[in-house]
Amino acid sequence: MTYTAPPAADPPTVADLVAALDERYPPAWAEQWDRVGPVLGEPGQPVRRVLCVVDCVPETVAEARRRGADLIVAHHPLLLRGVSSVAPTTYKGRIVHDLIKADTALYVAHTNADVASPGVSDALAARLDLRDPRPLRPAAPGSPAAGEGRGAGRVGELPAPLRLAELAELAANRLPPTAWGVRAAGDPDRLIRTVAVCGGSGDSFLADATAAGADAYLTADLRHHPAGEHLAAGGPALLDAAHWATERPWLDELAAWLAGRFPVEVTVSDLDTDPWTLHAPSPPVPSPLKEHQP
């Protein structure tokens, strides 16, 4: 999807957009281990076209080049961990070289966008029409992000109760399609009213979903043992979607805001950059829990 603002004779610069993005998603809100903000690009370079992506990978860099994008705004950091070389013979080095050759700047908003309000999980909550969303884990008092509804994940109410099976189907229809789809854990007939969501990897917030009184929790990258123990303890039902699909909705909100703030054309990439590309479902089983047969 492309969001277009009236063109201007004097377009904004990379520095202008970086300043606005830093104001909306202050780097101080990011986790200490994170790497956010401008990655590369000349500050004085004019910006007429922007591409918003979840992942800065060769495929989205090629898309930016085709579209003539002057700036990529990505959710996931390209250089999260230290590197000793950006030689073009390395995976990330090749990306850096391609961006520089195309005069395409790169900016990252990651965990600072996760806790923002509105942020990544607000957009995910909106896909399910959740009402009155509130933080799943509010930002700690005294932290840079504290206050004004900021924090990790969101909890809200469905417009009308749904069975877990119906909620899983709704999520699969509302989220961007992926090979992973949406899988659920719990009684298919469990009635769901309150839903917790977290864009991206969210199994560290399982206890928060229980404490929030959620009937179901939608996130990504749930692991076998934490999920099993959570359910055994009577926690909310679980819905596990593809990581990319839970964060892609935020790009629309981001793009609309950028196009409303600057006279630029902003496109949201719909390239599925989830690493899982094939799903071969198992044959039907008679019940969710199969007794061991010797």
Image (tube, helix red, strand yellow):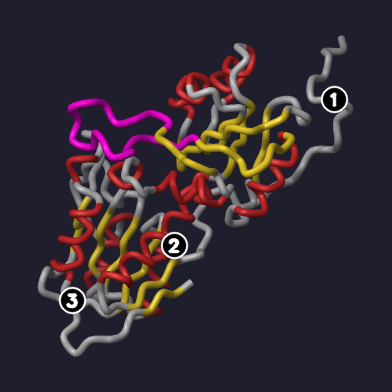
- Residue drawn 32% across the image and 47% down it: 113
Identify the amino acid type marked 2. Asp
Identify the residue under disc 3. Answer: 12
Q: Given contact means CB atoms under 8 Å apart, are the residues at marks 1 and 3 in contact?
A: no
Which residue is the site of mark 2?
252
Question: Toward the viewer: 186 or 105?
Answer: 186
The answer to whether 232 is drawn above or below residue 262 in the figure is above
What span is colored magenta in the figure? 136-155
Quadrant into which the C terminus falls: top right
Magenta stretch encompasses residue 251: no
Residue farthest along the left direction in this orientation: 44
| Relative to 243, residue 187 above or below | above
Residue at which label 1 appears: 287
Above or below: residue 5 compared with residue 166: below
Asked if residue 208 lies left or right of residue 292, the reply is: left
In this orientation, which residue lies closer to the viewer: 143 or 92? 143
> Element type at marker 1?
loop
Q: Earlier in the sequence, mark 2 or mark 3?
A: 3
Q: How many marks?
A: 3
Name the element at disc 3: loop
Residue 73 screen position, x and y as percent? 31, 61
Q: Which mark is residue 105?
A: none
**Amino acid type, residue under disc 3 in the picture:** Pro
Q: Amino acid at mark 1?
A: Ser
- Mark 2 neighbour density, 10 Å: few (under 14) some (14–19) many (20 or more): some
Magenta run includes residue 144: yes
**How far is the residue under mark 1 from the one under mark 3?**
59 Å
Q: CA distance from mark 2 to mark 1?
A: 39 Å
Relative to 188, 77 lies left or right: left
Depth check: 282 or 239 in front?
Answer: 239
Residue 203 x %, y %: 48, 28
Upstream in sequence: badge 2 or badge 1: 2
